[in-house]
Structures are given as structure tokens and as C-alpha cells.
Amino acid sequence: QVQLVESGGGLVQAGDSLRLSCAASGRAFSSYTMGWFRQAPGKERQFLAVISKSGASTIYADSVKGRFTISRDNAKNTVFLQMNSLKPEDTAVYYCAANKVTFSILALEYDYWGRGTQVTVSS
């Protein structure tokens, strides 16, 4: 089992950058595929990025490709989401998630979730 805690959210202006972190407790962090998702008010949870257990492979949603970068530090049990050129439509609660089985973009395949961190981008 793993517990996840996101941090790094906040209020920024359009065009700014933020770096989100997700700290995982417990052992065997490197055995989990890690993903980032977000959910805006009244909308479904949206996939953003996934990184493989070793960090060698990543997939991004088209909406963030070229602006967001997912990375991980297995020695520090942490996954990151670097977000550049932020837009007002990026405003949402951002969640990290973990699963041991699949390298997936589907939220339903993730077993463990953090509580989220709010990102608000003003125009």
C-alpha cells in the first residue's frame, strides 16, 4: 500500500509555471506506475501524464503535451509535474495516483490517490 500527498499548487497568472510534487510513503515506490490527473468543477477527472516505474517511458494528454513534464525520483519516493505556460483552463484540482499493474492513462486503473492540490490560473 502507498499513501500519496500532493503539494506545490497555488494561484498564478497565465503564462506562469508551477512544479507539483507528490510524495509517496511506504516502500517499493519504484514498483508503481505514477500518473497525474486533474478535475475542474463540474467536469470529469482528466488524465494528464503517466510515467513508468523506471521513469523511462511517459505519455501525455494532447492538451498538455509540450507544456507539462512528468518526472520521478525513486530515491526520494517522489513524482513531479512541471507545468509551464499555464492557461486559465488549467485551473483544477490536481491529483497524483499510483498503480502496480498497468502503464495506463485510465483513472479507473489506479488504486491509490492523493487528496489533490488546487491550481488556479488567472487571466
Image (cartoon, helix red, strand yellow):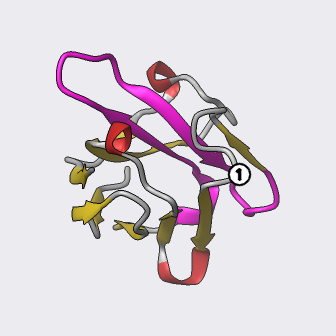
- Residue 89 in the image: x percent, y percent? 36, 36
Q: Which residue is mark 1?
A: 52
Horizontally, residue 32 falls left or right of residue 92, namely right
Q: Which residue type carries mark 1?
A: Ser
Q: Residue furthest front?
A: 123
Q: Residue at x 59, y 69 (%)?
A: 72
| Res 69 quadrant in image | bottom right
- Residue 98 in the image: x percent, y percent? 47, 45
| Res 95 quadrant in image | top left
| Res 12 quadrant in image | bottom left
Q: Nearer the viewer, residue 116 or 111?
A: 116
Q: Nearer the viewer, residue 15 or 47?
A: 15
Horizontally, residue 12 falls left or right of residue 34, namely left
Q: Is residue 46 magenta?
A: yes
The secondary structure type at the circle numbered 1 is loop
Q: Which residues are magenta?
A: 28-57
Q: Residue at x 71, y 51 (%)?
A: 52
Q: Give the answer, above or below, for where 105 lies relative to 72.
A: above
Other residues around mark 1 within 10 Å, as few (<14) / some (14–19) / many (≥20): many
Q: Is residue 89 magenta?
A: no
- Residue 96 in the image: x percent, y percent? 40, 49
